[in-house]
Amino acid sequence: MLVLIAAHAAVAALLPALAPRAGRAVWWVAALVPLATLVWAAALTPGVLDGDTPVEHFGWAPSLGLEVVLRLDALSLLMTVIVSGVGAAVLFYGARYTSEGHGRESALLLAFAGVMLGLVTADNLLVLYVFWELTTVVSFLLIAGRGRTREHRQAAQQALVVTTGGGLAMLLGFVMLGETAGTYRISELVADPPDGGYVPAALVLVLVGVFTKSAQFPLHGWLPAAMVAPTTVSAYLHAAAMVKAGVYLTARLAPGFADTEPWRPLVLTVGLLSLVLGAWRALWESDLKRVLAYGTISELGLLIALFGYGTRNSALAGEVMLLAHATFKASLFLITGLVEHHTGTREIGRLSGLGRRRPVLLALAALAAASMAGLPPLVGYLGHEAYFDAFWNAARQGPGAGEEWVLAALVAGSTLTVAYAVRYLWGAFASRPGAEPTPQEDPGDRAPGMAVPIAALVTATVALGVWYPGTETLTEPYADRLPSPQKPYHLALWHGLSPALGLSAAALAAGLLLYRLRPALAALRERAPRAPDAQKGYRRTEQGLDRAALGFTRRTQVGSLPVYLTVLLTTVLVVPGTALLLRDTPFTAPPLWASAIQVPLGVVVLTAAVTLARVRRRLSAALLAGAVGYGVAGLFLVQGAPDLALTQLLVETLTLVIIVLVLRGLPAHLGPRRARPRTRRLRLALSAAAGTLVALLAVAASAARRDPAVSAYYTEHVKEAGAHNVVNAIIVDFRAMDTLGEIAVLLVAAIGVGALILLPAGAREAAGAPVRSRPPAADRYPDTARWGVPQDRWLPEAENMPAHDRLIMLEVVTRLLFPSILVLSVYLLYSGHLRPGGGFAGGLVAGQAFTLRYLVGGRIDVAFAGRVDPRVIAGAGLALAATAGLAPIAFGGEPLATALPSVTLPVFGHLELSTSVVFDTGVYLLVVGVCLKLLAAMGPAQAPVEEAPRPSGGEPGGESGGESGGAGQSVPSDAPGSRGR
């Protein structure tokens, strides 16, 4: 199972690179993976249906209840067949349907198939949640497409917000269930469900996640909005995969919790409301995809009600309808795409006469719509008969959940389903009286290829109905796990004259009559009060939150750094200060210093900090801030922490250089003081009090330690990580999970900073920021910085600079130092396990080498030196670190575990290696990529702007920032005195 999930991810990662050469063929390559999964599932089907349950177990963080456990039982098998079978059909269809973006779209759909496979086989609540949220992320990317229209972006955002909000509620419910039961294993939780305590609240939270993911009333608005996505996305995500996640979770938990309040009333109420309201809304839509979208909401409500009811017969009906919905709804979505391909429209009012010209397509659509309406001998009919029989008998001897009303809602929903099925079929293919046939576009050679997957799905909906013994064999094992208050129901096309048959016939006749009376109902509908619209409700909620946030921000974000610092420092004084006063441990004053060298270093830090608060020149303030950092690095070194000292030194140096570069575009002096002397004295007192309090808290916290420090464990077990350097072993081994998260955050932060620096001019003007030119994408990574272009001189861009701007001595020194610094960075990377250094320190050293190159040659010469897009370098680093962390799973180990292989080589002799070096190399690459990205984003340098007039008549002290501005006017990069970068 894990191998198949990894195969989905690996092939999806390769498809964008294959697309430029393979074109549409990447869709066929992608389709082979779910097709192979379907074959694998078919091979395991006999054993699983006989009771075998393959399980794969991988440790992750067992102490936190986080274990990667994959389990294939009858329900997971059924979902795997749906996910892989429909996925393969959609991907084959996409090869002919999609005209652009083959690599991106096929990769995302394949990745989604892999995520769904992980979701339906996960046997741990937390692992299931991870896959659950991954479906949200991938669906956001699929719905948004390339983000070319506002409609796409808004639909994707709405789906993301609604489903993520529900997912967070569900996560809280999972944690409550897991902690109450003492296990996060789903199979154990269902076999021995907890009761009482937090369980009812936990179930409500879990069901909130179910309802948002499966688009249930009143949280359904995101699904119709998502119909802006391509047909392939709608057919897969919104018929077979994403929206089925909520149905699957309901079915998974129902055997254990169906009898726990308030499970059954809640799922029946929400599910049946969605069934009726969704079908009613589908009857009035004019866009074929929106007809199917509201129909999907209706059918998902039906499925949740059937599975959530929690009896054997209702679950059997739910499984049959699950298969039926996957086949007929996916085929109808694909048919809609082909209709649009032929005619250029999905609007029912503009379609006429298509059935006569495309009889094969009409026949396929008729069979799929007939299954949706519940006509024999199709699988939809089997499902309708099953749930009518289940609730007819339950109404007489059920557990007392209002089964009569449930049965009435099922009949009403089925009636409306028949009506909108006829509307879809008639609207898409009928010839309208007096209307000209819809003009057809030239289908080229793509239409036959698009029809083949549709035919396969329609064939499945027929075969599953005709071959009902096989359908029952596939669905019975899960259903038999649930209680059966009534006589067990068995699938058949003919049960004689039964109440279920009468209800099916009544729903069919009423649905046809309802469609015939639709024009008269339309007039009544126009005069009736409008029901609340979910989409309008979402937009109004969104606008209300925006207004509330804006009002709150206006009152709290006043644009003054001193005010913000005052609030923060006051909070520090009040909250931790109260804890310090109420402490129950004696306060022991520490020694003022451990060695004499700490005294001058402390004096340097304090002197620089005090002077920093009084200087008026920006450059002086930056240098003094650097002095504080260097002094702290010295204290680290004296204290015996060379790794911390090295990292502090490198970060301080790189930060100082970047600040100095930024200061070139700002006035030399800070703005005039605006605070009154009394206010300044208050701020001074507040700052001194906060600093003193933090120092006292540090001392008190050290004295209050009761348990032994974890540092002893690290020093005792450092050899197990194959290291001598404890700090680096902590970073890449003991706390590697933290490091992986931190470098991911670093990458996201770098992307955000780069986006802000390269903010379009209009947005910068609106924000009141100085406007600077944004180089075109081709200029940020110029064609000259490519492997195939020869470089015949050092710093070629320097020749374009004015003579008075060139620093010849620095250019010569850079030519010597640049490769030497890079070699030093690599040395620090690979020596970090044994002595001070490591990937982060090495990456910072390499970043300083490129910064030096930037100073003498500019952005273009940095691109010469880097050769590769910084985004690729940073992304490759994160991918390498993640791969190194996950690789042990393939060998039966725990994630992020370190292996210590040893080899004997000629000349070098016996070598002891550590796989954590691979992880550290990923950190190194990411840091280098981030540095290059920031340098590339800085673009052309700006000449110093005219400085603001210095304040007169005051002492040199005062505020060093905050309320004063200082942004000057930008100047062209080719102006006298500027140096183009």
Image (cartoon, grey):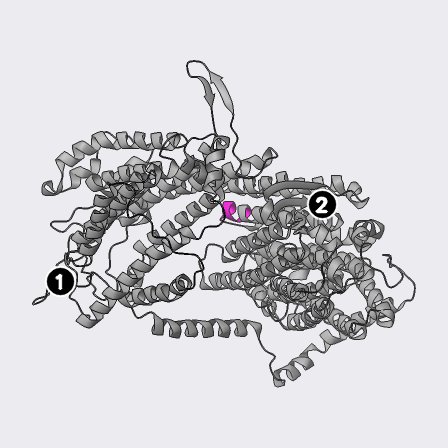
Outermost residue to the right: 496
* Among the 4 quarters of the image, the one containing residue 773: bottom left
Residue identified by numbered label 1: 948
Which span of residues is magenta-colored?
100-106
Position of 266 with respect to 621 (left or right) is right
**Badge 1: residue crowd in 10 Å (few <14, some 14–19, many ≥20):** some
Position of 479 with respect to 546 (left or right) is right
The picture places residue 507, in percent across and down from the top left corner, at 79, 71
Task: Please report the residue visible at 72 percent of the width from the left and 78 percent of the height from the top.
Answer: 517
Residue kind at label 2, given as amino acid type? Leu
The picture places residue 607, in percent across and down from the top left corner, at 19, 52
Q: Is residue 121 magenta?
A: no
Q: Whole-Å distance between the Cαs marked 1 and 2?
A: 71 Å
Find numbered disc 1 in the image and state the secondary structure of the residue it sits on. loop
Outermost residue to the top: 906
Residue identified by numbered label 2: 72
- Decide if residue 457 is in sight here: no
Between residue 628 and residue 832, name the one nearer to us: 628
Find numbered disc 2 in the image and state the secondary structure of the residue it sits on. loop
* Among the 4 quarters of the image, the one containing residue 430: bottom right
Between residue 814 and residue 418, name the one nearer to us: 814
Relative to 159, say whether 924 is above or below.
above
Q: How many marks?
A: 2
